[in-house]
Amino acid sequence: MAGSLNTLTGLGNPAVALTPSSVKATLPTNYLSSSDFNFLNQYLPDTYEQEFERYGNRSIASFLRNVSAEIPSASDLIKWAEQGRLHTKYTTATPIAGTTGGDDAVTFDIGTATCNFRVGQTVFLSNNAGSTSYRGLVTECPVSGDATRFRVAFYNASGIAAGDTSATFTAFVYGSEFQKGSAGMSGSLDPKDDIFEVKPVIIKDKFEVSGSDMAQIGWVEVTTENGASGYLWYVKAEHETRLRFDDYLEMMMIEHVPTEVGSGVAATALTATSGSQGLFDAIEDRGNVWSGGNPSTLGEFDDIVNRLDKQGAIAENVLFVNREFSFDIDDMLAAQNSYGAGGTSYGLFDNDKDMAISLGFSSFRRGYDFYKSDWKYLNDATLRGGLVGGAVNGVLIPAGTMSVYDQIMGKNMKRPFLHVRYRASEAENRKFKTWVTGSAGGAATSDLDAMQVNFLSERALCTLGANNFVLFKD
């Protein structure tokens, strides 16, 4: 039976509560008051002292802890180099105007790029729209000073077919051939690294409570996810600020984007930074994006595997997905079981009537090993859960490390594909900094009759080899 979440039979109303339960300041209205439980009434209510945790663990900070390392950095700019391709292939090589069928040598133009083929190299040419292919020898490159052109003599006697003179070809070098006693290869190829950079951003938050409110005891025993408990409401508020700030640290590394020239942020006096590239933006910029719904068939996953083959071909990958995507993968894998007409013979196979049936999968192998994990951030109703525009259903992250040249260390270093760099030196560590100011709660730094708890971190996310990542979007 189909239906929306709030009209589906058995669920009913109300809708999911999204109204924030916190306000900007600690006020009397932020406390449970006597109007909720009137102790002046002659009939004493039966009360529960402890606050009920109806939303469970509300924090979403766990993703980066599982997939990344945290490494100190002492600079305003973090740069690294990633290897380019070892071999070169051009997919837009077209015969220049005037080429006729049967020519034994043809000049090709690759467009705007500079061709790096050299005289004496053997090339393979394949028609992008047909089944014909040729093998030839580069006789000139560049051609008459034009750096986008190369000239090929064909090994077959008939040369290029008349029907291919207006086609577009893919060309790559597969070797070289020279005469006896001839001179060596003319020219050489130098490796080209791709240089990437990110800038750390400063993230701040603050909690403030007056000295009078610190002396106010309540009748409700409050608790937080990190184990703090007691009858002082400001303790709960301070710990929730800390938890919220911890979530911000992770979400900034996932969601943030660089500041574009001419943007409103670039013109404002609120920040002197230029933003920083988060995970999602890095994948959209340098990685692979699957759009148009979740891949839910083996054929669609085969397309993903084929793309990964063309990238780093990392053997193990982790899929962090929302609930819908997780179910789609489970259904896809269950459908491969020819004995599971109702999907009930996969999971635990003893078929005991008292045994629970496992209807989910945690991993599978299809060309590569894929491990599946639910990502709370994508399911949380107050964050990315339930989004329509710009919805992200999951992300594929390669496991392991890669070797990069560290500009600061001056040598190759092993780094996780995904890691956080935070500002630190011998005198200052800004990984997660907190301090107390004011004149209440033990602090004695000013005449302010309050306690202010300040939070600060300065960090950036380094996404190495983003070409091995896949972002799944609607």
Image (cartoon, rainbow, N blue to C red):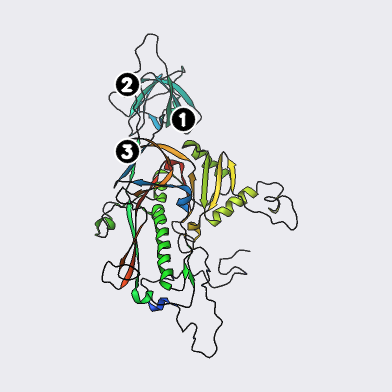
Q: What mark, if any, has residue 127 been given in the picture?
A: 1
Where residue 42 appears, as percent x and y from the top left, is 53, 91
Determine the residue located farthest toward the bottom in the rendered image: 42
Eyeballing the image, is 32 above or below 397? below
Q: Which mark is in front, 1 or 2?
A: 2
Q: Give the crowd class for mark 1: few <14, some 14-19, many >=20 residues within 10 Å.
A: some
Label 2: state its secondary structure: loop
Residue at 37%, 8% (x, y): give it. 181
Q: Is residue 290 visible?
A: no
Q: Which mark is in front, 2 or 3?
A: 3
The mark that comes first in sequence, 1 or 2, is 1
The mark that comes first in sequence, 3 or 1, is 1
Q: What amino acid does circle 1 point to?
A: Asn
Cα–Cα span, label 3 and label 1: 42 Å
Residue at 40%, 54% (x, y): give it. 255
Q: What mark, if any, has residue 407 been given in the picture?
A: 3
